[in-house]
Image (tube, helix red, strand yellow):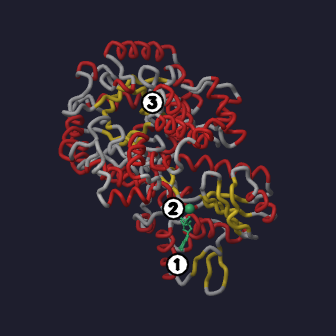
């Protein structure tokens, strides 16, 4: 996957140009291109090879992308970097800093490192700069914390494709009996520190050779007979272990974790006079099993526990009482409840969206474009919304398999009213309401806004309810207890936004919502077709939140869904 690499270069070019004070259109073009590339669910190399269009990317940028893929960098970027003091780009990467702020700070204090900036903030020297406030300083400090955290843990949505690519290559090039992703990636945690891979092979040396020479490798940290570690060009660590056939299941359990879950399993084992570790299940010194994961659970009196639940959040107790949930499966999902089309800032037409849904084996899609006042995101006027509805009606009449729902992601305005009048909302199949402005309001104001939106009889769900963006922004200050209570009272659903940086509601909050009887809606928030593939990330969150088929609207057939959505009205 070169997507991240290419996107990063383009983002940095945009920042460098901004520091230099270049043409804003040129800067925006690079940033948009970077965003669209980052959001591709497929490898950009493939997209370019097959001559497919990427929005915002013309011939000039395609040449640049090819150069990055072939040489690992871009001449023009390297030249630009020479014009800017080293380290300044690191400051720009801090959320809440940006090129202009970084430039001002640099001009006054001459610093270019994160730690120096943190020190200046703590000494309250930043708020003394012209045009800076105490709040700016506070936000920069928060931003620094986020960057530090982000260096440690990256979003699953970016790491999963890398893991899968490694597995594919190893399978193709080595003699393997078994191979699995373990660790937090297998448990589908929203962010991960590194990739853990487990292998069983009759030719372990060959596996180590191939692994340490993968094209993504930048350093080999360790290369041994049974364990090797590499670092990718992106700075991500990947560990690979080879284990014997007889202990494969026990090792897979051990290296899947979580650590907290493993501890509970071992305690149960001890109570039964057994010992369980990565080498197997033992009675005294006698090996009595461990080839399959199921044997480990069985030995301690548990049914198989899916990896997503292994966090010691009640799965052991539930398992012992045979009350584990029957987790939602990706194949049970029949549609996507949040996709943007060309009507607002999406790149695809209605029929392209339908075609993508067909390809993914879905049955329907709710096309939810932005509402009229969200001008930056191509908010749809009332007139265009009616045109869209007509187009969807005609589409549905002629489509025998895929159905579209005419939806909107209506803005919750600053006073809590909605960005379309009720007469308009009531004509739509599906309405999600979202906060896109006034993030910095206080808890009471934000909560009241959201609660008011839920009181509207035409609002079915709240999109990305907490507003957090992984490694970039904390959620809005909301009183979630009140939000959940109002959702119950008004029969309003809450979204699990499946976009890789959002995953909001998260696993724990999804479980809380479900326990209260709230239904969840999974929506990818796709702005380009490839992003519809993020649907699985939404399912992962749901599974980590103990959700079953009946807890999410996405498992309904089109007719069931339309029937259900009428209930609120
Ligand atoms: P992360 O931080 O995203 O990499 O999360 P994990 O869970 O992948 O953590 P990692 O990579 O440190 O370890 C992989 C698994 O190996 C972990 O989930 C459980 C197991 N493990 C690692 N160290 C220990 C340990 O000291 N004790 C136990 N019981 N298990 C361990
Ligand atoms: Ca790990």
Task: Answer above or below: position of 71 versus 318.
Answer: above
Tell me: residue 334, above or below residue 205: above
Q: Secondary structure at mark 2?
A: loop
Seen from the viewer's position, the closer of residues 450 and 286 is 450
Task: Give the distance between the C-alpha atoms of the residues marked 3 and 2, in whole angstroms.
Answer: 33 Å
Secondary structure beneath disc 3? strand
User: Which of the numbered marks, if any, corresponds to residue 339?
Assistant: 3
Q: Is residue 533 visible to us here?
A: no
Can you tell me whether the CB of the residue at mark 3 lies under 8 Å from the nearest atom of ligand 1? no
- The percent position of residue 137, horizontal first and vertical second, equals 31, 51
Q: Is residue 53 left or right of residue 416?
A: right
Q: Quadrant of residue 392?
A: top left
The residue that appears at 73% across and 53% down in the rendered structure is 214
Indicate yes or no: mark 1 CB to ligand 1 under 8 Å: no
Q: Which residue is mark 1?
A: 269
Figure quadrant, ligand 2: bottom right
Q: Are marks 3 and 2 in contact (CB under 8 Å)?
A: no
**Residue count near mark 1 (Cα–Cα under 10 Å), binned few <14, some 14–19, many ≥20:** many
Identify the residue position indicated by label 2 in the image.
305
Identify which residue is drawn at 31% across, 45% down.
518
* Residue 370, quarter of picture: top left
Spatial distance from mark 3 to mark 1, Cα to Cα?
47 Å
**From the viewer's perspective, is the residue at label 3 or at label 1 nearer?**
3
Choose between 104 and 520: the one closer to the eye: 104
Q: Badge 3: few (under 14), some or many (20 or more) residues near its Cα, within 10 Å?
A: many
Q: Nearer the viewer, residue 80 or 512?
A: 80
**Helix, strand or loop under label 1:** helix
Of the numbered discs in the image, which one, if any, rests on residue 477? none
Where residue 225 appears, x then y in whole percent? Answer: 76, 70
Residue at left offset 74%, top offset 59%: 212
Position of residue 150 in the picture relative to residue 66 (left or right) = left
Q: Is residue 516 above or below residue 375?
A: below
């Amino acid at each position: 996957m070169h997507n991240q690499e290419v996107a990063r270069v383009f983002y940095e070019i945009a920042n460098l140009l901004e520091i230099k004070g270049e043409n804003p259109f040129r800067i925006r073009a690079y940033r948009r291109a970077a965003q669209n590339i980052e959001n591709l669910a497929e490898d950009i190399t493939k997209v370019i090879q097959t001559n497919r269009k990427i929005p915002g990317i013309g011939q000039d940028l395609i040449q640049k992308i090819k150069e990055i893929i072939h040489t690992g960098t871009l001449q023009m970027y390297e030249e630009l970097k020479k014009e800017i003091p080293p380290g300044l780009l690191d400051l720009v990467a801090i959320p809440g800093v940006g090129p202009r702020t970084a430039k001002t700070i640099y001009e006054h204090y001459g610093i270019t490192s994160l730690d120096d900036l943190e020190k200046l903030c703590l000494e309250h020297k930043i708020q003394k700069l012209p045009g800076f406030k105490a709040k700016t300083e506070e936000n920069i400090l928060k931003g620094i914390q986020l960057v530090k955290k982000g260096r440690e843990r990256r979003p699953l949505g970016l790491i999963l494709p890398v893991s899968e690519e490694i597995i594919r290559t190893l399978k193709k090039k080595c003699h393997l009996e078994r191979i699995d992703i373990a660790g937090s990636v297998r448990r589908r945690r929203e962010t991960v520190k590194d990739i853990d891979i487990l292998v069983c092979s009759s030719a372990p040396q060959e596996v180590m050779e191939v692994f340490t020479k993968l094209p993504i490798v930048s350093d080999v940290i360790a290369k041994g007979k049974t364990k090797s570690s590499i670092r990718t060009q992106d700075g991500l660590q990947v560990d690979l272990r080879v284990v014997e056939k007889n202990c494969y299941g026990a090792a897979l359990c051990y290296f899947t974790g979580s650590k907290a879950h493993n501890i509970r399993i071992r305690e149960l084992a001890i109570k039964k006079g057994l010992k369980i570790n990565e080498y197997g299940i033992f009675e005294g010194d006698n090996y009595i099993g461990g080839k399959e994961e199921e044997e480990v659970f069985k030995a301690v009196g548990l049914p198989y526990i899916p990896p997503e639940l292994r966090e010691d959040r009640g799965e052991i107790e539930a398992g012992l009482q045979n009350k584990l949930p029957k987790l939602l499966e990706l194949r049970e999902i029949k549609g996507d409840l949040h996709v943007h089309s060309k009507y607002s800032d999406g790149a695809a037409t209605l029929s392209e969206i339908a075609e993508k849904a067909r390809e993914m084996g879905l049955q329907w899609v709710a096309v939810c474009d932005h509402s009229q006042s969200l001008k930056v995101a191509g908010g749809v006027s009332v007139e265009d919304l009616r045109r869209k509805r007509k187009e969807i009606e005609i589409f549905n009449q002629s489509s025998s398999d895929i159905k579209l729902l005419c939806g909107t992601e209506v803005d919750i305005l600053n006073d809590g009213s909605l960005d379309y009048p009720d007469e308009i909302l009531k004509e739509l199949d599906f309405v999600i309401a979202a906060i896109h402005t006034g993030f910095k309001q206080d808890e009471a104001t934000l909560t009241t806004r959201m609660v008011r939106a839920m009181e509207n009889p035409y609002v079915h769900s709240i999109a990305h309810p907490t507003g957090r963006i992984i490694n970039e922004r904390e959620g809005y200050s909301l009183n979630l207890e009140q939000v959940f209570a109002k959702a119950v009272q008004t029969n309003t659903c809450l979204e699990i936004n499946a976009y890789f940086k959002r995953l909001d509601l998260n696993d724990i909050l999804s479980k809380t919502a479900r326990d209260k009887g709230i239904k969840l809606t999974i929506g990818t928030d796709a702005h380009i077709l490839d992003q519809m593939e993020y649907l699985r990330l939404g399912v992962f969150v749901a599974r980590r939140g103990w959700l079953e088929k009946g807890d999410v609207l996405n498992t309904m057939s089109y007719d069931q869904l339309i029937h259900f959505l009428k209930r609120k009205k």
